[in-house]
Amino acid sequence: MAIHYYCRHCSKDVGKLSQWQADDNQLGFSQLSEEERKEMIEYDSQGHIQVKVICEDCETTLREHPDYHAYETFLH
């Protein structure tokens, strides 16, 4: 099982943990609400975990333009 982290806004690959054996507590997933888990975590057909996060570039953009929080994607 691998865990892939990518940006929810620009789809940039943020990182990957290969052959990772961890539970939800170790990954911090247990701290998320059920709604947050559904929004952020997906499993692909091979059982790998896809985690939506925000990359540094998009985080900076959101800080500079807080009205962009209303959009799923703000990059064109």
Image (cartoon, rainbow, N blue to C red):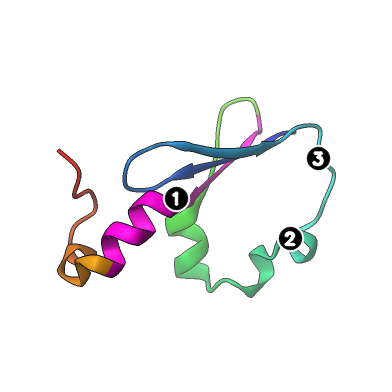
Name the mark on residue 55.
1
Q: CA distance from mark 2 to mark 3?
A: 12 Å
From the image, which quarter does the C terminus lie in? top left
Which amino acid does the dot numbered 2 rest on?
A: Asp
The residue lying toward the viewer, choosing from 17 and 43, is: 17
- Residue at (38, 37) in percent of width and height: 11
Which amino acid does the dot numbered 1 rest on?
A: Cys
- Residue located farthest toward the top when viewing the structure as drawn: 46
Few, some or many residues within 10 Å of mark 2 (<14, 14–19, 20+)? few
Which amino acid does the dot numbered 3 rest on?
A: Trp
The label nearer to you, 2 versus 3, is 3
Q: CA distance from mark 1 to mark 3?
A: 21 Å
Q: Is residue 23 left or right of residue 35?
A: right
- CB atoms at circles 2 and 3 under 8 Å apart? no
Q: CA distance from mark 1 to mark 2?
A: 22 Å
Residue named by callout 3:
20
Residue 7 in the image, given as x and y percentages of width and height: 42, 45
The residue lying toward the viewer, choosing from 11 and 45, is: 11
Q: Which residues are magenta?
A: 47-63
- CB atoms at circles 1 and 2 under 8 Å apart? no
- Residue at (24, 67) in percent of width and height: 64
Few, some or many residues within 10 Å of mark 1 (<14, 14–19, 20+)? some
Name the mark on residue 47.
none
The first of marks 1 and 3 along the sequence is 3
Residue 52 lies within the magenta run: yes
